[in-house]
Each structure stands twice: as structure tokens, then as C-alpha cells.
Image (cartoon, helix red, strand yellow):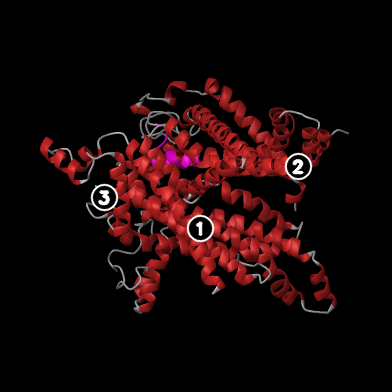
Amino acid sequence: MSLWQRRWRRFRRNRLSMLGAVVVVFLVLLAIFGPYFAPYPKDATGAVHIADRLKPPSAEHWMGTDDVGRDILSRILVGSRLSLGAGVIVLLVAIGIGATLGALSGYIGGAFDRLLQRVTDIFLTVPDLILAMAVSAALGPSLVNVVIAISLVWWPGYCRLVRAEVLRTKNELFVEATRALGTPDWQILFRHVIPNILTPVLVKASMDIGFAVLTLASLGFIGLGSQPPAPDWGKMISDGRRFLPESWWISAFPGMAIFMTVFAFNLLGDGVRDVFDPRARD
Amino acid sequence: MKLASYIAQRIMLIIPVLIGLTLLTFTLSHIVPGDPALLAAGQQATAEMVEQIRQEFGLDKPLYVQYGMYIKGLLTGDWGRSILSRRPVLEDLRVFWPATFELVSVGMLIAIVIGIPLGVVSAVMQGRWPDHFSRVYALLGVSIPAFWLALLLQWFIALRFGFLPIGGRINSQIGAPETITGLYILDSILTMNGPALKSALTHILLPAITLSMPPLATITRMTRSSMLETLNQEYIRTARAKGLSERVILLRHALRNAFLPTLTMVGLSIGWLMGGSVLVETIYDWPGIGLYAVKSAMSLDFMPIMGITFIYGVIFSLINLVVDLLYAAVDPRIQLT
């Protein structure tokens, strides 16, 4: 049995993680195809139907309508593409910057390494959300800026991880052996070092993606994320606040969507970590 | 003596990081769209007034001069002025800090008081229902959006059933207790003010519970796994063989040693609590730094944001130092170097 088959078997044994994986696949499909299934696709943006405002959940509007009569379900479906897409981009940017700098830092060492480590210290010394808020406030409220802000706050984590892994791998016997055989540095980096650090990075990413979605929603809730009329899950919740407790559905369903998404990704991430890092298992 | 020199050493390491942080916030404040002088002057200001403000704040000087002025201000207690509150930022921070400190402390307390026993129980009952429950909770607790949970609690408990107040720090008719520490709970105890104590406690309950969810989850999990590791050690078997009671083994021998990783988690959680307080304070209208930060961010009032980022950097660095010191105090094997 191959290594991957064994890993897959171990993953499958964990029923909660399997559930998470199934929900994640479902959510990804929704993000891709959901907008085509949305019952009222125009409601995702600036449509106004005053006659339908604040309608409770019904056969026509499964999750009710908001204060200008837009269908909540349609907005959530279209919004899932925004939330998941932005979450993935945050990770790609954070990993791109963090892994590159971390690999260089570990490989070159010396003054460059020391300086870069102090720079990561700066970012790690302020709570995530506060720093992300400061950055996105400075850049101005928009989805792109929130993505930039969170990536900027998160790259140091990946930088540290990759640096540590590079330092570890660099001194492994098999790397030393290849070097003794005269393999050039860049080839060692790409053939031996990078494949070895890929696993921990993927594990961290699988655990972080849920938090990326959550942080995006949090900043959206504050009002720093995508601007109206875009169907931002966090913003939908804060817009619905004014209509509590009577029109509870406006805030309740987008919150449920965030919660389900983050929870599913966390279940999946937990399972992935168990498979790749048996020491972390209980 | 050794301890003092260790602390001095650590503080020397914190300083360059904080200087870096001021560079970061200073850069941020200069990429803010819009003219800060225009913003500070207000909409009815004439061109001369704007120009006067520009000179007053040194906005016409080169960047390095402005940075120098900013650092000088930070050191001499002039942290700039808030456009919104029209007060010095440092004064605002002094006014709002006790509320946040109180909220974060009570949230942390809830997380520790429930999380550690829950972790111990699920380690002892490994594989049985309390353990499964705590595992699911560990993931649920960190997945639930704090701002959404806050709304749900507000809606169910405060609005629908009227059990608890929906927001604020104290009933305005009762009024704040006489200020000694600025912490309402403590102040009302010190001044023997019964009604104020009751009001303060009922007001803090929902926000503190909301805030405690994620750290409660991580602390439970961390306690569980380090308890499991400790329970497999030889000295636990020795203790059992000696015929010690299970209670003594668990609390005196296992938990004490399992506490270290939990302590790290507590330190890290404080950072999360300070960040999360931004969301929770917004919903419960809790007059602390978090609410101040959100209001300032939304009106592009950047001096307070710089002040908050900086002070949180200082606090978080000091907390990490304290955690490391506690580490050495709990575990004599650890040498401070």
C-alpha cells in the first residue's frame, strides 16, 4: 500500500473530518455554481423591491428578504464566491510572500536572516485583527484592501514555518550527500528542500483557511470589507442588526453560512493535520 | 540579580521591535487616502485654517522630520489628538482602557476556570462522551463568528427574555461606582456599592461569555493533550504504585506538569481576546478600546489607530515576557538565559 493510500485510509477513519471534507466540497461547488442556482440572481447586488421588504422565510424566499426586499438566499449563494475566493487568495498571497522570504532567510542565513526575523517579530507583536484593521483602514475600505491587509498580517507565520523547515532540511544527511555529489544549490532547493517543506505548509494552510474566511467576515462586519451592494456575509450580518429581533433572518442566515464554512474547513484541517503529523494526534 | 538582568535583556529585545512597529504605523498613517489636515479641520474650514493645521501638525515638513516628531511625541506623552473625540489620544486610551481590561480579564477568567477542568476531565475520560464533546467543542468554539454569537445571545437572552441587559457597561440610572481602579466590578466592591456591583456583573456577562469562546476551546484542548502526555509518564505510575489517591495524582502530580503548555496558550489567547474585543465591544456597545478603534477606523481618524496599535504591541510584548517568567517559576527545570 502506498503512503498516500495509507494517509487516505487514516483520514477516512476520522468521521468528523470526513464530514468536514464533504461539506467543504459542497461549499466549493456552491461557490462555483451557486450563483447560477440563485433564485433571484439580481438581488445579489443593488436590486430594490420595496413591496417585498423584510419578508420572513417562505416558499418564495427560503431565507426571507432584507430591508430593501432582496432575497437573502441569493445573496448568500453569490456571496459564498466572494468569501471563499477571498479566503483562498489571502492564503495564496500570505504563503507566496511568507514561503519565499522564509526559504531565502533559512537558506542564506546571516544578517539577512536576522533582519527578516526582526521584521516578522514586528508583525507578530500586535493582535492579528487589530493590525489587519489598521492596515485596511489605512488603505480604505474595499474587498481587495482587506485581502491585502490580512495577507500582510499573516505572511510572518508562514515565513517562520518555512524558515524552520529549511533549516532542518538543510542539515539532513540526504541533502548533505547530494551536495557532496556536486548538485548545484538551486537544484537542491527545488528537488529536495521544497518538496520536504510543502507538507507542513499545506497542513498549516488547511487549518488557516477557515480563519481566513472568519477574519474576512469580521472585517466585513466592521464595515471595512467589500462595500454595498456586494453580498459580503459579514456586512449582511451588521446590516441586519438594526432589524433585530423582529426580522432575525437577515442576520441569522449569513452568520450560519460563515459558521458552517469555517467549521467545515476546521474539521477538514484537523483531519489533515492528524494524517500528516501523527505526533499531534491524541 | 539573575532575574533582573534577564528581564533587562528581554526588554532590550522588545525595544527594536517596538521601534519597527512605530515605523509600520507611521507608514500606514501616510498611505491613508485623503488629506489629514483637511479631515482634522472639518468641513467648514477655510483654506487658511487647513493651512494652519498643516503647519501645526508639521504636515508640511519632510517625512523623516515628521517621523522624528512622532517619536518625540510618543516618548513625551503627546500621542496626537483624536478628531472624533477632540481629546488627546493618550487621554482617550486612559479612559477606555479599564473597560477593555475588565472585559478581557473576565473573559480570560471564564476560559481558564471552565477550560482547565474540562480539559482534565476529557483526558481522564479519554474516548468517552465528555472527551468527544470537548473535541467537537474545541472546533466549534473557534469556528463560531464572535460577532454573530454576540448577536444571537443579545437576541435570545437580552431582547427576547430580558434576562440580561443588551449592552453598555452599567445601568445609567445606577451610574458608575466611584473611580478607584476604573474597573467597575472591583470599584463597586471596594466602595461596597451593591447595586452597582450587580449591574456591572449583569452587563459584563454576555460580552465576556462571547469573548471567552475561542480561548476556552483552545485551553481545553491544550490541557487535555498535555494531561494525556503527562499521565503516561513513569512518575505517575510510581505515584499510583505508592497508593496515592487519584485526586492527588491528578491535581498535584499530573496537572502541575501539564500546566506549562496551557500557560503558553493562555498567553497567546490574550492577544486573541484583545483582537476579538473589537467585535464584541462593537455589538454590546462596550465603551472600551475596541469600540474606540472601530469608530476611529471607520472615520479615518488615524492618530488613535496608531496609538492603539502601538499600545497593544507594548502590552502583548510584556505579556509574552510575563508568560516566560511564569514558565520558569512553575518549572524549576527551565533556566532563564
Quadrant for the N terminus of chain A, please: top right
**Badge 2 element:** helix
Disc ID at residue B82: 3
Task: Give the percent coordinates (x, y) of residue A213.
Answer: 53, 38
Q: Judge from the rendering whether residue A44 lies leftward or rightward of residue B131; answer left or right.
A: left
Q: Are marks 2 and 3 on the same chain?
A: no
Q: What predominant SS class does the magenta segment belong to?
A: helix
Q: Judge from the rendering whether residue B229 lies leftward or rightward of residue B201; answer left or right.
A: right
Give the magenta range: A215-226
* Chain at tag 3: B
Disc ID at residue A165: none
Mark 1 surroundings: few (<14), some (14-19) or many (≥20) residues within 10 A: many
Disc ID at residue A275: 2
* Chain at tag 1: B
Q: Judge from the rendering whether residue A19 lies leftward or rightward of residue B318; answer left or right.
A: right
Task: Give the percent coordinates (x, y) of residue A10.
Answer: 80, 41
The picture quadrant where one finds residue A185 is top right
**What amino acid is labelled 1 in the image?**
Ile
Mark 3 surroundings: few (<14), some (14-19) or many (≥20) residues within 10 A: many
Vertical relation: A242 (above or below) B71: above
**Residue A95, magenta (yes or no):** no
Task: Give the percent coordinates (x, y) of residue B64.
Answer: 31, 42
For the question of whether residue B169 can be seen, the reply is yes
Vertical relation: A4 (above or below) B270: above
* Chain at tag 2: A
* Residue position for label 1: B270
For the question of whether residue B130 can be seen, the reply is no
